[in-house]
Amino acid sequence: MTAVAPVVRGPDRRKVGTRLHAALGAVPTFVLWIVVGLWTLPTLGMFVSSFRPEQDVKTTGWWSVVSDPQLTLDNYRSVFDTAGTDAPNMWQHFLNSLAITVPATLIPLALAAFAAYAFAWMDFKGRGWMFVGVVALMAVPLQMSLVPLLQLYTGGAHITLFEQTFTLFPDLDLAGSPTAVWITHVGSALPLAIFLLHNYMASLPKEILEAARIDGADHPTIFWRLVLPLSVPALAAFGIFQFLWVWNDYLVALTFVGGAPDAAPMTIRLASLSGGRGQDWHLLTAAAFVSTALPLAVFFALQRFFVRGLLAGSVKG
Amino acid sequence: MAEVVEILVGVGVAVGVVVGLFLAANLLLDQATQRYTLFSTSAGAFVGALVGALANSGGWFLGGPAWPIGGAVLGAAAGAGLGQRRPPSLARRRRIVERLRPTVFLAPAFLFIAVALVAPTLRTIYLSVRGRRGEELVGADNYRSVLEDRSIFTLDGVGDILTSRLFLLAVGLAAVTAVVTVARARIAHRDIDLGGPGPVLSMTGVAILVVLAAVGTLRAVLWNNLYWVVFVTLVSTAVGLGIAVLADRARGESLAKSLIFMPMAISFVGASIIWRFVYAYTPAGRDQIGLLNAVWVGGGGEPQAWIQQAPWNTLFLIAIMIWIQTGFAMVILSAAIKAVPTELLEAARVDGASDGQVFWRITIPQIRPTLAVVVTTLVIVVLKVYDIVKVMTNGEFGTNVIANQMFDEAFINRDLGRGSALAVLLFVSVVPLMVINVRRSRRDAA
């Protein structure tokens, strides 16, 4: 509206000022897009290089693709083709990633939904303190659980009382299996999941739940029929967050399946490629893109939910 | 294809067991008001089976299913007897349901948290005061040996900070800031204003210069973690805020924000490979394939092996984390900026405030709580940094950090005591942030 007003009033001096103002007004946008360009350049470099022939990738910069556009799918073929080596196929690593990520996303989602409902809508002794405990646990570094959990997965947990040994946790020989990885992820994800879902469920209008109670609905009914359907946005938000987190995890996987190449997820394969064939940029870039393709697709398709999840976790009040 | 099916079945079973147990427990609880004997019998069987299994696996007898089944039968009998002989009043049964329902909702999550989070955390603390294999008590020896390890912690070079050029520059900047601030206050006949953009920005600059001076002279694992925290937190928050402001109502806002945010979807390992390629080095005379060296050589420099040259290589690793986390800061801060009430901004403009003043005096104070959240979240994430260092340098060339040192001690040197002590150090440095988080959540709940 300020753009129209000076024209109506007429004097030329104002018009020039407006034009200058408009030009200056474009500066922030210009700066923004320069920053965006800088931010995207590294990823673009990887993406372009993954399609260039090996010789080109190793001898010329990827930006020379502009003057010499030679593209090939050979790099992807060699990433997937492991004939002649005993290394597992990239497809195998993809499946391993999936076998870890899906349970590590769905199970905390279910467990946290139960617990979040209890924290948000049930009265019981110690509710406040338990919730404080959950919030505090969110910040505990993963490193605190690695050594004991590896011991647990390889030997179980035993306690000796009155000269009798009780097995608190049987030796299931889990190390080297995806199960060990996802159990660890479930444990470490639950505090954040409970926190996020609780915040959302607690913000649902009280009246609906009270009306349901008056109609005689008990807690399980309210949970399944009312609160869970209403909480879909929060569930989706945490689900995507957790999916990306677990898919991209390296430390937990390295600790528990680092010695078992057959069970290793993609991040492990990628890191070992980087360590072992660090100068084979044509393979590295292709492998890096293969491993990021799914999370990137999920990210771009469901970004709205992801952002909402981040916000629910951090912006309150 | 067979494998995909196998995975799907496995996942289905795992999720089904979790949800099924929850449903069954709730169904069982529902019986307490109507068919109390059924409830007490099955509850008794459940408890009996658990106790039996626990006793059995200790090896009292031969093992096998006999113990849990026996326990279940005994428990069921006891429960049935109790339920038959003295069934409680309906009001009491209702209270039992009321009391047990939260347990059914909380128990599954708490079980996982106890097994995979709380118990391991306590055990790590316990292991940190015991020997290599956790066999004998050694008191604070692990902590002592870790902190006396000069690659982990040292004060050598503290003195050199004071004489380094960066430090002198910082002192100069601080002096200029002080003089200018005082002079401006005198001229305008106002009190000295330390909260204005000038003093705040230049004091931040001073702080950065001092830390840079430290990077140049003071090197050890613990110090490196400090540098990571300082730079990633400061730069990601500042740049994220800057982009959020620039993008606000700009053309193509959502696309621009998505692209900045995108690195959040890439694994740290993937990001490290992307950036190793940016930092790639080929000897002088050949074409540079790394973007940074290409620009550097294009500007007339000699090609550099950026990630191998201490002390500044740490900064090149830190840049990767900044690249990833800026998107996070931007998304959160952008939402906070949009939530600032428009009336407030317009009122300030009507009063004649410039854009800069509106930003500094209205927007920033309004989003301060969110800024605090971003900073604490970033510090918690960055303290644990592992993947980037592992993939880029494996901790060599003076770039090691606590998490990488911890992994090496615990799983490669197989010294559980020292490894656990390092984990506890990490934990202790997170505790203040934990307290902040708890306080904030209590205040929000109130």
Image (tube, coloured by chain):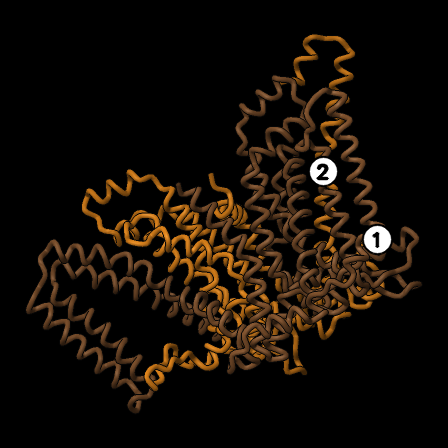
Chain colours: A orange, B brown
Which label was assigned to residue B201?
2
Q: Quick one: label 2, few (<14), some, or many (20+) residues within 10 Å? A: few
Which label was assigned to residue B164?
1
At 45% from the left and 64% from the top, the residue drawn is A186
Please state which amino acid type lies under the numbered disc 2: Leu
The disc numbered 2 marks a residue on which chain?
Answer: B
Q: From the top left corner, tell me how far across and down residue A282 is, in percent.
A: 75, 67
Q: Is residue B310 above or below residue B246?
A: below
Q: Quadrant of the C terminus of chain B?
A: top left
Which residue is at the front of the view, B4 or B338? Answer: B338
CA–CA distance in space, label 1 to label 2: 22 Å
Specify whether B210 is left or right of B437.
Answer: right
Instruction: Indicate which label's residue lies in the foreground, 1 or 2.
Output: 1
Residue at the far left in the pictured view: B85
The disc numbered 1 marks a residue on which chain?
Answer: B
Which label was assigned to residue B378?
none
Considering the numbered disc 2 on the image, is that residue within a helix, a strand or a loop?
helix
At 72% from the left and 27% from the top, the residue drawn is A25
Figure quadrant of residue B138: bottom right
Q: From the top left corner, tell me how far across and down residue B7 is, in percent.
A: 46, 71
Q: From the top left corner, tell me how far across and down residue A136 is, in percent.
A: 46, 55
Labelled pair 1, 2 in contact (Cβ < 8 Å): no
Q: From the top left corner, tell me how far across and down residue B305 is, in percent.
A: 83, 63
Q: Is residue A63 above or below residue B440?
A: below
At 65% from the left and 77% from the top, the residue drawn is A82
